Image (cartoon, grey):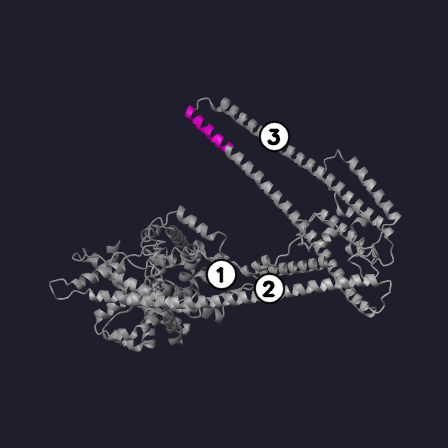
């Protein structure tokens, strides 16, 4: 009884674990790295953490020992329950072993010769084969032997081993084999034993026949392959000889010797390539055949798994019946305890002893289970405490690192101020010390410092995660300012990481959209405004671009980008010369575009050439190269091409990147109107000192703040820009001025104001505060207002350009008529 209870418990535990594992696998979402395909994503590979490690250790600790597989009958029944065999290890030998175990249990005991461990009060009987059934089985076996001997010389692929052809008495269900034997004599056991032995003998004979036929089939297949290879070699030899004969008879007359040798070499190369092609075709056929075989094996394993599951279910039902029978036996023994001289006293005592033994085992298992549960709870508590302490130490470390960044930044600024020369001829020793301290602070930190790594963290690296150089190498003063700015950025990022990160919100949102398509909504807009995490930026940028250019991509033919690129490379392109000149000037401070051999240079060239062929009215304009370079950091070539189409043809007005830059001039006038409305004090201050700030903001609009703000803020602006459109440029341009409004109002002359405007955007480091100003303090910000003002200023700019063109024509006519002015040239003529 212990054997069957252990086996049931073990099988149920494994089945539940398999179901849980399958459910977990079905709920697991894809890794975000699948969408990171740009230049930046290749430099920052993600790491995957192993799951359920504690559960795996618990399975190893609580594993049940298996009994020896060679024991049969009572010896196997006395062993602990074996682990359930998988469907791959299924064999008929296991079925015969189980039948023997059942037969041995049926013969166990003196007074209960035919009563097995499957005994119940219901009328379940192990049916013995009748003489008629035995005769039918023998006749069917004789017919099969005659058929096998008659077909021995054939080479067909018939499969003689079939479960359906075994006599039905040898493969009866387990329910038919389990039954009651209350009133049956011990003399009925011999037919059952004979039937089991006969079934094993038939199975072994069929297995031997199947193996022999399989060996013959494999041998014939090998012979066939060798014959095919021989035929192929002969065909090649014949073709080669015919080709040589043709050359010897027809082409040798009047042809130079070196030409013949060259033709022979080419012919040998063609033959070699044909041989390689045939070999690859053979390998392909072999692989396809292997795939078919594997599919067949998977189907067989699934069928065997179903059979095993049915067997387990039948055993579960039998054990439940036995449990009810055991409870009924307990009641009957308690009611008949007074009858000492009863003929059933011996059997009742044995049942009571078996019951006591089972109770002891149950109590032992309960005690062991309580102990293990207690240990697991204690280990879980220890693990939680360790994780809490680790989080606390991590928070303290982050806080200290942020403070260290701030202190080092202030230290650099202080040293720079102390280094200022004083009005004295003699150089003081303190100034030498300060100079030395400055050199040590600006010195690049070595990459390997094993002793100091535990005491001083590597605060500022040479490049940030986007590939931009953090500290320049040419100017010492600019180098000092850049390192101080990098330290402040590091401090801000560490402070933000201590708070609740937006990464959790992004993970939850992407998990909710796993089984449905992403759509525009308020939640997604707020998430994008807060910034897309680095690991999800490739996926989201691609989705935003496809959202805006879906109609263009649907109307384009497959391989549209490659077709444009091929045409641009094959045919003369007037824009190619200017593109080549601007490639290395695009982002020289980014490692992906710093040299001609950099990975991004070729991709940048391909995208710009393809776009110049798609849009010949624009061709190429300075500024497009920077837009494409930023897009290529997170997108592949074709996606970056469609990103450029989105910006030029969807977001921006017409003539924005043409020769006249008409749309760009219109946007500067619209921005001036918005400045007077949203920031009237600052606008009046600029008007008072006659400062034309549109000379600075013109480049902001043309390249969407590239090389104007720090990289962290730049990519947050691009996140919102690709989702919402050009209105974001106006928002952030106004937010930059509002961020430093008070500092600008303190400047009291035009030179200092203009000098401050040239670099003040690089001093803004708090992206969260800037975003709050752009999307909070500047509301309301209707797009209709921007469109109306664009229309109004567009007419005015066109009139001005018409007047300028008329003045130019008058100048040209006057120069032709007047001799004194013939030496004068216009700006356009001078450029050309």
Tell me the quarter of the picture where residue 54 sits.
Answer: bottom right
Q: How would you rate the neighbour count of disc 2 (Cα within 10 Å): few for under 14, some for 14-19, many for 20 or more?
A: some
Q: Residue at x 63, y 46 (%)?
A: 294
Query: Could you classify mark 3 by the number of other residues whose Cα lies within 10 Å: few (under 14), some (14-19), or many (20 or more)?
Result: few
Main secondary-structure element of the magenta-colored stretch: helix
Q: Are marks 2 and 3 in contact (CB under 8 Å)?
A: no
Spatial CA distance of label 1 from label 3 is 56 Å
User: In the displayed structure, does residue 316 sit left or right of residue 636?
Assistant: right
Q: Which residue is mark 3?
A: 231
Segment colored magenta: 257-271
Of the residues under marks 2 and 3, which one precedes in the sequence? Answer: 3
Would you name the residue on which mark 2 appears? 372
Residue at 49% in and 65% down: 507
The one nearer the camera, 387 or 24, is: 387
Q: Which disc, if any, is residue 551? A: 1
Closer to the N terminus: mark 1 or mark 2?
Answer: 2
């Amino acid at each position: 009884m212990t054997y069957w209870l252990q086996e049931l418990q073990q099988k149920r535990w494994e089945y539940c674990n398999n179901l849980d594992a399958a459910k977990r696998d079905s709920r697991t979402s894809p890794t975000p790295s699948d969408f990171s395909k740009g230049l930046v994503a290749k430099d920052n590979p993600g790491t995957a953490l192993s799951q359920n490690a504690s559960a795996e250790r618990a399975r190893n600790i609580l594993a049940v020992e298996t009994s020896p597989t060679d024991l049969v009958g009572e010896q196997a029944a006395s062993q602990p329950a074996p682990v359930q065999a998988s469907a791959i290890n299924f064999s008929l030998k296991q079925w015969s072993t189980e039948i023997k175990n059942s037969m041995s249990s049926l013969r166990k005991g003196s007074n209960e010769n035919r009563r097995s461990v499957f005994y119940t009060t219901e009328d379940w009987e192990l049916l013995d084969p009748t003489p008629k059934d035995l005769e039918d089985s023998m006749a069917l076996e004789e017919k099969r032997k005659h058929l096998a001997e008659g077909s021995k010389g054939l080479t067909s692929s018939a499969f003689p081993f079939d479960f359906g052809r075994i006599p039905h008495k040898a493969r009866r269900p387990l329910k038919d084999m389990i039954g009651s034997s209350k009133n049956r004599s011990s003399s009925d056991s011999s037919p059952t034993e004979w039937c089991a032995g006969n079934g094993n003998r038939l199975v072994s004979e069929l297995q031997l026949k199947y193996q022999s036929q399989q060996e013959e089939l494999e041998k014939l297949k090998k012979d066939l392959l060798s014959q095919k290879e021989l035929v192929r070699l002969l065909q090649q030899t014949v073709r080669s000889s015919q080709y040589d004969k043709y050359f010897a008879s027809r082409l040798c007359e009047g042809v130079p010797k070196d030409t013949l040798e060259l033709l022979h070499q080419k012919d040998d190369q063609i033959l070699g390539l044909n041989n390689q092609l045939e070999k690859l075709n053979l390998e392909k056929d072999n692989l396809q055949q292997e795939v078919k075989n594997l599919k067949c094996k998977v189907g067989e394993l699934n069928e065997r798994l179903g059979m095993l599951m049915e067997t387990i279910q039948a055993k579960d039902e039998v054990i439940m019946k036995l449990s009810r029978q055991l409870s009924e036996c307990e009641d009957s023994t308690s009611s008949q305890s007074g009858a000492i001289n009863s003929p059933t006293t011996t059997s009742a005592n044995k049942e009571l002893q078996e019951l006591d033994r089972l109770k002891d085992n149950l109590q032992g298992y309960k005690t062991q289970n309580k102990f293990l549960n207690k240990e697991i709870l204690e280990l879980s508590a220890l693990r939680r405490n360790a994780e809490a302490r680790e989080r606390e130490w991590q928070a303290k470390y982050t806080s200290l690192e942020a403070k260290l960044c701030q202190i080092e930044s202030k230290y650099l600024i202080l040293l720079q101020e102390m280094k200022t020369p004083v009005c004295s001829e003699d150089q003081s020793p303190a100034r030498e010390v300060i100079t030395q301290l400055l050199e040590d602070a600006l010195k690049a930190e070595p990459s390997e410092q094993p002793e100091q790594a535990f005491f001083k963290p590597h605060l500022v690296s040479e490049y940030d995660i986007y590939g931009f150089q953090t500290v320049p190498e040419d100017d010492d003063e600019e180098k000092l300012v850049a390192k101080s700015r990098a330290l402040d950025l590091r401090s801000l990022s560490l402070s933000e990481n201590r708070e609740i990160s937006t990464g959790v919100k992004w993970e939850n949102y992407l998990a909710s959209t796993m089984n449905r398509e992403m759509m525009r909504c308020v939640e997604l807009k707020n998430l994008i405004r807060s910034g897309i995490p680095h690991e999800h930026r490739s996926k989201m940028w691609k989705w935003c671009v496809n959202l805006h250019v879906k109609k263009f991509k649907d109307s384009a033919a497959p391989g549209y980008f490659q077709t444009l690129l091929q045409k641009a490379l094959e045919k003369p392109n007037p824009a190619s010369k200017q593109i080549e000149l601007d490639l290395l000037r695009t982002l020289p401070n980014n490692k992906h575009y710093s040299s001609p051999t950099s990975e991004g240079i070729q991709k940048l060239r391909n995208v710009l050439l393809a776009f110049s062929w798609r849009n010949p009215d624009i061709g190429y304009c300075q500024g497009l190269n920077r837009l494409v370079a930023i897009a290529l950091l997170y997108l592949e070539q074709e996606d970056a091409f469609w990103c450029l189409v989105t910006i030029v043809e969807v977001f921006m007005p017409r003539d924005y990147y043409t020769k006249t830059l008409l749309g760009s001039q219109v946007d500067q006038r619209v921005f001036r109107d918005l400045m007077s409305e949203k920031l009237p004090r600052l606008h009046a201050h600029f008007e008072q000192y006659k400062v034309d700030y549109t000379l600075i903001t013109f480049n902001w609009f043309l390249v969407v703040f590239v090389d104007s703000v720090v990289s962290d803020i730049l990519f947050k602006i691009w996140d919102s820009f690709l989702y919402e459109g050009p209105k974001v440029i106006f928002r952030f341009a106004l937010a930059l001025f509002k961020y430093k409004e008070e500092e600008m109002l303190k400047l009291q002359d035009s030179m200092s104001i203009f000098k401050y405007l040239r670099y003040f955007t690089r001093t803004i480091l708090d992206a969260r505060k800037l975003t709050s100003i752009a999307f909070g303090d500047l509301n309301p910000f209707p797009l209709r207002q921007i469109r109306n003002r664009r229309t109004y200023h567009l007419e005015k700019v066109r009139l001005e350009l018409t007047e300028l063109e008329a003045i130019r024509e008058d100048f040209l006519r006057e120069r032709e008529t007047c001799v004194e002015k013939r030496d004068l040239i216009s700006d356009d003529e001078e450029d050309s």
